[in-house]
Amino acid sequence: MAAGAPRFFVSHLSGVAVFDPTGDQVGRVRDLVVILRVGRRPPRLLGLVVELATRRRIFLPMTRVTAVQSGQVITTGVLNVRRFEQRPTERLVFGELLDRRVTLVDTDEEVTVLDLSVHQLPARRDWEIDRVFVRKGRKGGAFRRSKGETLTVEWSAVTGFSLEEHGQGAENLLATFEQLRPADLANVLHHLSPKRRAEVAAALDDDRLADVLEELPEDDQIEILGKLKEERAADVLEAMDPDDAADLLAELPEEDKERLLSLMQPGDAADMRRLMAYEEHTAGGLMTTEPIILRPDATVAEALARVRNPDLSPALAAQVYVCRPPDETPTGKYLGTVHFQRLLRDPPYTLVSSILDDDLQPLEPDAALPVVAGFFAAYDMVAAPVVDEAGSLLGVVTVDDVLDHMLPEDWRETEFHLDEGVVTDGA
């Protein structure tokens, strides 16, 4: 595998060392986790099963893999060390797909799977298994040494992997809903029976479920979270935007809330506790604690690199916030904001401190919802900084959170239409 290559064969990852950005080894790859799809559509590669030095096996999402190079995998350095548990819709590549007997579509001939090719989709962070390396001939434990023609074919050229079209319950629904936006999938889930809603939620991966929960009514959020295992519920809360997760936690009984907070990463739990200390309908209660924060000596090029992060919402990517250290909320002294359009107009080497918008007065954490809404309307903003009396940036309020709190509670039920042909309940 060449450095940074967008394609590799899975056998090349067996036992490969996993390193954090500083060069320290954190473990070794023991398997790959994919999710199969209905028909002959290529499966998505969700992540890697990594064995730590303690022999504990954890799940490393592909979104936290920054490079797959010859002999090593590089991560962002952020690892969830909870023990890996396989979910119903997931398949292990080494454990379940390799050495499997499948059928060539064109010739109806049975072949044995020796390897699988993975590639990264253009302009996206998703990875798919798109090719299958197979051997013709008899099945046997010594198939790698046996005679027989080998060939590489497209995933669609074989059968015997993918989910059946019927009778797969939540798995079939997931395939149907795969292309829906989180808000649209949330509306579908809202109209399912509680039983089917729980099945689909259990089968979604953490990031997808987190995105969907953020769009659901409060009652549905609480119901779904209550049916997840506690450790998984904590993982999903960590994957949610901090403000949405804090709102959801605040609605739980005190005992349940504290138990979930104790299972979360300390930094995430601290953010939740800080957000829950503010009244719900105030700037502090509405804000998220994860905006783009830069020091005054950062350049326009650095700012644009941060803005390009595909995990950011458009509102959070619309501007960066310049502060003295520390760089995480609550920060050092807040100096001002640089808007995305201004970043596009200045040379890459320009210091962000020289192009600050420091005329607008930031919001105070106890500013009431009408004051916050008036700020957005008056200044045509999509995000606004929240700063405390000491001048530290606490977080950022985005316009979508303001709208969520100003619309009627049943706004999701108004003028909502699914595309024709989408199943809303199979129970």
Image (tube, rainbow, N blue to C red):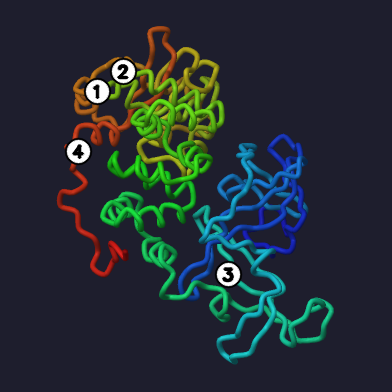
Along the line of sight, the residue nearer the viewer: 255 or 119: 255
Residue occupied by mark 1 = 372
Circle 1 packing at 10 Å, graded few (<14), some (14-19), many (20+), is: many
Classify residue 391 by image quadrant.
top left
Could you tell me if the residues under marks 1 and 2 are in contact, i.e. CB atoms within 8 Å? yes
Q: Give the image location of residue 254, x and y in percent.
A: 40, 25
Label at residue 363: 2
Mark 4 or mark 2, which is nearer the start of the sequence?
2
Inter-mark Cα distance, 4 to 1: 19 Å
Inter-mark Cα distance, 1 to 2: 7 Å
Along the line of sight, the residue nearer the viewer: 215 or 264: 264
Circle 3 packing at 10 Å, graded few (<14), some (14-19), many (20+), is: some
Mark 3 or mark 4, which is nearer the start of the sequence?
3
Residue occupied by mark 4 = 409
Q: Which residue is at the far top?
A: 390
Q: Is residue 52 left or right of residue 80?
A: right
Asked if residue 359 can be seen in this view, the reply is no
Q: Give the image location of residue 9, x and y in percent.
A: 69, 65
Mark 4 vs mark 3: in front: 4
Residue type highlighted by circle 3: Asp
Residue type highlighted by circle 4: Glu
Along the line of sight, the residue nearer the viewer: 375 or 65: 65
Q: Is residue 408 left or right of residue 96?
A: left
Q: Where's the N terminus, which quadrant?
A: bottom right
Q: Is residue 396 above or below residue 85?
A: above
Asked if residue 30 can be seen in this view, the reply is yes
Label at residue 227: none
Q: Is residue 50 above or below residue 108?
A: above
Q: Is residue 424 left or right of residue 311?
A: left
